Each structure stands twice: as structure tokens, then as C-alpha cells.
Amino acid sequence: MTAYQIDGTPGKPWLMFSNSLGTDLRMWQTQVDFLKNDFRILRYDTRGHGGAGPRPSPATLAGLGQDVLDLLDMLEIERVHFCGLSMGGMIAQWLGIHAPQRLEKLVIANSAPRIGTPQGWRDRAAQVRATGLDAVADGAAGRWFTPAFAEREPERVAALVATLRGGSPEGYASCCDALAEADLRARISGISTPTLLISGAADPVTTVDDAIAMRRQIGGSAMLTLDASHISNVEAATAFNLALADFLGDIMRPATPT
């Protein structure tokens, strides 16, 4: 069962958000608060996260993408603007390749067509299945945020880490399995949906170079680099929100030089 939440203004264009690995739909609250007057907003928990339990079959990127299409069908929503971060950004790419007819515009944040290495994801999945999420959660703040932000906003960082720590080990591990097999490098050049790429200048997981490579492959795409680490929608919320409003409203600001 997919857990989801609808906010915003009836009759406005649909905007859908997809969470990163180890988080849930609450990671987008600042974006919802900023954009709710101009959009009908759909957030959901990726399978195995938040209120969405893991599925009985092994997770794949195609399966995670199909979950989005199934939810849109269930809610009778034909087309959406779609914004995903990290794992959610890979889902966004899959949709851009396989279901462009369901998309208006695409925002791919802090992501890449191949994240990490297959063995790295398999090792993490095995670790989580064996010992739970504590070890992964212990290192999450350093992967997700710059030290300056973690010092400035300790409660926000702690809340996100607590979500990861309290999550489903099997749900997390299953998504690691999906990421181990996910490689869209040879296919993203087929994305024709208007696309904005957002990167974090200090992101150690999906780098600015990853975003530059994607911009070269996705024809007509725009790119913006924010002063943030991996979860840029939280760390650089104001800049992220303005970028979304400008891009989705057809008044895109100049991209940060890279």
C-alpha cells in the first residue's frame, strides 16, 4: 500500500514529490508550505519508507517508477510536475524515459543516473538486514548536510536522522537492492520533458560533476547549484523553493555558474 498526502489548492497544476532513501514525505514540508497556493501537491512514501510497507517481490527502479504511475492512476491524475531527490531523482529519470506522457516538467535534485556502486549498495543492504539501521543512521548527518548546517539547525537534522533510524530495515535494504541494479547512463539522453537539475556544491554523494554530465545528456535542461550538501531542499530551502517556483512558472532564473 502506498502512503500519500495531498495538499495545496484544488484546480491548480499537480506537483508530485518523491523522497530520498531513508526519509519520508515529510522531507518536503518546506516546499509544500511555500508552493501550496500555486499547486495541488501530492507527496508519497517510496515503498519501504514511512507509511508504505515493502512489497513481497524484490524492489527494482522500474518497480519504484511503476508505483508512481499506479498512484497517479488510482487518483485519476493524468499529468504532473515531478520533483525527486537522490533516489527520488532516479525515479524521476525513469519516468522521464518511460512515461513522458504523464509529465509536465521534471526536477531532478541531488541525483545521478548511477549512484554509488553495485557492490556498495549490496554491502549496505546486507549490513542493514544483519544489524538494522543504527550504523547507517549514525553517519547520515555527515552525508546529508554540511557541518555548518548541522551546527546551525541541530533539531532539523536530528529529526531527519530519527526518521531513518526508526524506519524499516527491510524496506531500506530493498531499495538498496534497487539502486544496486539501477543504471540509466545510456538512456537519459532520451528524456525530452523540460528538466531542471539541482545539485549541491558540497554534496559528496551525487556531485556537481554528476549534474553537469546529466545536463550534457538531457537536451535543453537547466542546472542550478545550491550552497548545500545532499539534502539540498532542506539545507538550502529558500533557494530550492525559488528555483522550483521559477522553473515551474516558466520564469527560470539564470543558473549558478559551474
Image (cartoon, rainbow, N blue to C red):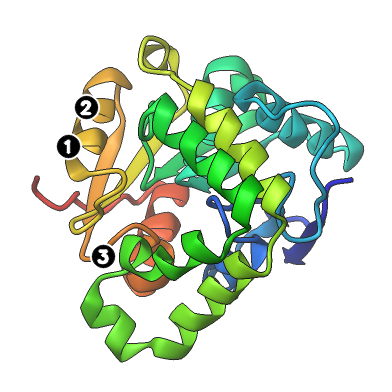
Q: Residues within 10 Å of mark 3 (few under 14, many from 20)?
A: many
| Mark 1 → mark 2, Cα distance in angstroms | 6 Å
Residue at the (25%, 29%) spot, across then down: 215
Q: Which labelled disc corresponds to residue 213?
A: 2
Q: Quadrant of residue 64?
A: top right
What separation in Å lies between label 2 and label 3 (alpha carbons)? 19 Å
Question: What residue is shown at x 29% (from left), y 80% (from top)?
Answer: 149
Where does residue 140 sit, x and y in percent of width and height?
42, 64
The mark found on residue 228 in the picture is 3
| Contact check, label 1 and label 2, Cβ < 8 Å | yes
Residue found at x 51% / y 37%:
105
**Residue 193 x %, y %:** 47, 26
How many discs appear?
Answer: 3
Q: Are marks 2 and 3 in contact (CB under 8 Å)?
A: no
Q: Residue 124 versus residue 190: which sits nearer the camera?
A: 124
Residue 64 drawn above or below residue 137:
above
